[in-house]
Image (cartoon, helix red, strand yellow):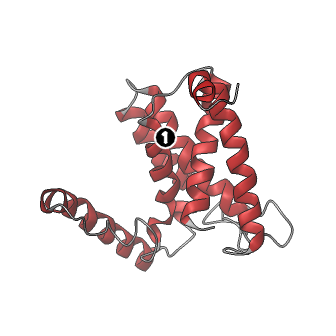
Amino acid sequence: MNATTHAVFGVAAFAGACLAAGVEPPAYAYPAAVVAAWLPDVDNPRSRLGNGLGRMRSPALNLLSRPLSWALQATSFLLARTVGHRTLTHSLLGLALFSFPVWLLLGGYPVLALALVAGYASHLLADALNTRGVPLLWPFGRPFRLLPGGIRSGGAAEIVVAVGVLVLAGYALALLHPALSSALGLS
């Protein structure tokens, strides 16, 4: 799946988790869910995060973002050379290795922690729809697919799935933020 589809899945998963938990998330948590939805692909140097952060127009922002960009590129290079793409980061082990420190470090901010974990988990779900599937039990077993044959990444079927998930995310957001839906004239 492409980065936009993963972003949509991340927001939808986070909104759904908030509905299930009965919490109204702050606006800053949604971008965290999107970034976390991109994170499993850091093992691919050509991915949104694996390629590092792009150059910014502001010299000050560029100076601040460079260390993070270099760290992302180094992590991507290391993962690509040691375990490869769609292995550790696309498994339940990878989800656990991500979730445990998130809950430890952000225990005082449970909604932000939920955004990060839901976003990461949404990536695995989205890629399980793909033709390659995901190795949930990596390093054991075969890739897991939710659909026989799967959906080709970048194809028309991916767009249809992304739009469907976007509609579900919009519905969940309207339920979570009634003021937003009334401001948009939806209620």
Q: Which residue is mark 1?
A: 30
**Residue at the outermost right position:** 148
Image position, residue 57 (x, y; %): 22, 65
Image mark count: 1
Quadrant location of the N terminus in the rendered image: bottom right
Q: Nearer the viewer, residue 90 or 169?
A: 169
User: In the figure, residue 16 lies in which quadrant?
Assistant: top right
Residue 173 sits above or below residue 13 on the image: above
**Residue at the outermost front position:** 185
User: In the figure, residue 158 lies in which quadrant?
Assistant: bottom right
User: Which residue appears at 37% of the width and 23% of the height?
Assistant: 108
Image position, residue 53 (x, y; %): 32, 65
Secondary structure category for the residue under label 1: helix
Quadrant location of the C terminus in the rendered image: top right
User: In the figure, residue 157 lies in which quadrant?
Assistant: bottom right
Residue 160 sits above or below residue 170 on the image: below
Residue 158 sits above or below residue 118 on the image: below
Label 1 Cα neighbours within 10 Å, binned few <14 / some 14-19 / many ≥20: many
Q: Nearer the viewer, residue 135 or 114?
A: 114
User: Which residue appears at 84% of the width and 73% of the height?
Assistant: 149
Give the amino acid at mark 1. Tyr
Q: Nearer the viewer, residue 19 or 91?
A: 19
Image position, residue 25 (x, y; %): 51, 27
Determine if residue 136 is in view: no
